Amino acid sequence: MQSQSFKHRVIRSSLWIFSGNALTQIIRFISNLIMTRLLAPEMFGLMALAGVFIFGLNLLSDIGLKQILIQSKRSDERFVNTVWTIQVVRGWMIWLLSIAVAAVFYVMSAKDLLPVNSVYNNEMFPYIIAVIGLNSVFSGYEPTKLTYGNRNLNLRLNVTIALISQVIGFIAMMLWAYYQPDVWALVVGSLVATLSMTVLSLYLIDGKANYWCWDKEIYQEILHFGKWIFVSSIMGFLVMSSDKLMLGGLVDAKSLGYFAIAGLLVGAVVQLIGSLIHTVGFPALSETFRENPNALGKVFYKLRLPFDLILMFSCSFLFVTADMVVDILYDARYQSVGWILQILSISLFEVRYRLAGECFLAMGKPKLQSSLILVNLVCLYVFGFSMYYMFGFKGLVWAVACSALSTIPLILFYLRKYNILDWKKELVVLPVLVLGYMAGMATNFIYDKFI
C-alpha cells in the first residue's frame, strides 16, 4: 500500500512539475520573442552576465538549506526555523556582496583597467549587478513550507504560485519595455517575479509562519551536511557560468547576447527536464533510500527512462533544425543565434545523467557529485581556452557544449560501484537519437519545400 502511495505521489508530482515547467517555458518563450523585438541584442548580453555574478554569489554561499530540509529526518519547529533564519541572513549577505562587486567593477572601469570593448566595461554593468542582487533578499524570506511541499511530493500549489509569479514578472517587464525600452525592463521583471513568489508563498500555502530561531547544534549539523554542497556549488557555478565569464572579457555585449539567447532556447529543454529531475527525482530517490535502499537502482531507471527519451530526441532534432528555428522566431538581427544553438544542442545528451547526481545526494554522498563537477570544470577550462585561441568564438562554444559530456564515464563508474548500473537500460534508448535526427531532417525538408 505504501509503495502504491509512493508511486502515485511520484506520478502526480511529475505531472504537476512537467505541466508547470512546460507553461513556464512557454511564458519565457513568449517573453523572449516580445523582448527581442523591443530591445537590442546587447541588452540581453548585459543582463546575462550580471545574472551570472548574482547566481555565483548565491552558489558560493550555498550550504544546501533546501536539500537538508528535504533529506533530513528532522522536521521539528526549532530545526526548520533555524534553517529559515540562516536563509534570511544569507539573502542579505548576498545583496551586500553584490553591491561590493558592483563597486569593484565601477572603480576598475573608471581607472581603465577593463578591456575597452568588453561587457565588463559597459557603464551600466555595475548598476545592474547592484540592483538585481535584491532578488536574494526577496527569496531569502521564502517560507520553508514551500520546500516541504517538494519534500512530500505535493507540488500542485507550489507550481501554481511559480506560474503566477512568472506571469506577474512578465507583465511588469513588458510594460517597462514598452514605455522605456532599455535593459532595466529585464531587471524589473526579474525582481517583481521573485518578490511575487515569496509573497504568494507566505499567504497562499497553509502552515505555520517561520520565525527567527537559532540553535548552535542544528547549525553545526547543517554545516556538516552542507560542506560538500558548498564545494559542489562553487565548482558548479564555475562549470555553468565560466562560458559567460570568459566571453564577457573576450567579446562584446552583442555577441554575448546571441550566446545568451541560444542558451535560453536550449535551456528551455534543460529547465523543463532538470526541474523534474531535481524536484521529483531527488525526493523520490531520498525516500526510496530511506525506506528500501535495495530498490534504489530499479527506481532510478524507472525515473530516468522518460528523461532519456525526451532529451535524446531533442538533442538530435534541435541539432538539425537550429537554423530553421531561429529563422522562424527572430528577425535578421538575431540570425547568428542559429549556429550557436546548433552546437549547444549537443549538451542536451548529458542532462539525462543529472539524475545520477541526485541519486548520489539521496544516498548521502554529496562528495561524488563534487568529483563530477570537478571533472567538468577542468575540461571546460582546458578545452575552453585552447579552443578559443585556436578557433575563436566558435571554438569556445564547441568546448562549452562538449565539456559536460566528459563526466559521463565517471558517472557510469560510480553507478557500477554502488550496484545501480544496468547496461541494457543504458544502451536500449540510444536509437532515439536516430529518430530525432530523421525527424529533424524531415522537418527541414518540409520547411524548405513548402514554407
Image (cartoon, rainbow, N blue to C red):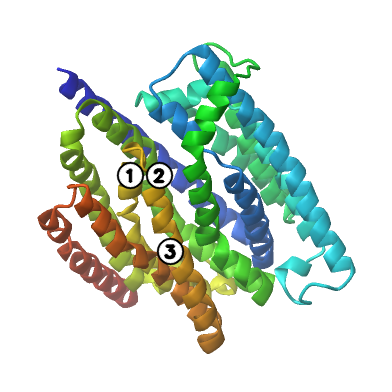
Left/right placement of residue 238 relative to residue 300 reads: right
* Mark identifier at residue 333: none
Circle 1 — which element?
helix
At 24% across and 65% down in the image, what residue appears?
Answer: 436
Mark 3 or 2: in front is: 2
Q: How many marks?
A: 3
For the residues bearing labels 1 and 2, Cβ distance under 8 angstroms:
yes
Q: Nearer the viewer, residue 238 or 52?
A: 238
Left/right placement of residue 79 relative to residue 286 reads: right
Q: Is residue 442 above or below residue 389?
A: above
Residue neighbourhood size for the residue with mark 2, other residues' Cα within 10 Å, grouped as few (<14), some (14–19), many (≥20): many
At 40% across and 64% down in the image, what residue appears?
Answer: 404
How much space separates mark 1 and mark 2, taking CA atoms? 6 Å
Tell me which corner region of the image, top left, top right, bottom left or bottom right, holds residue 286.
top left
How much space separates mark 1 and mark 3, taking CA atoms? 17 Å
Q: Which residue sits furthest left? A: 424
At 64% across and 66% down in the image, what residue appears?
Answer: 41
Q: Amino acid at mark 1?
A: Phe
At 29% across and 68% down in the image, what residue appears?
Answer: 316
Q: Is residue 150 visible?
A: no
Q: Nearer the viewer, residue 295 or 341?
A: 295
Tell me which corner region of the image, top left, top right, bottom left or bottom right, holds residue 208.
top right
* Mark identifier at residue 376: 3
x then y, percent, for residue 385: 54, 78
Q: Amino acid at mark 2?
A: Pro
Give the residue number, with chain letter if any, for mark 1.
Answer: 360
Give the residue number, with chain letter if any, for mark 2.
Answer: 366
x then y, percent, for residue 254: 65, 71
x then y, percent, for residue 295: 16, 35
N-terminal of the two: label 1 or label 2?
A: 1
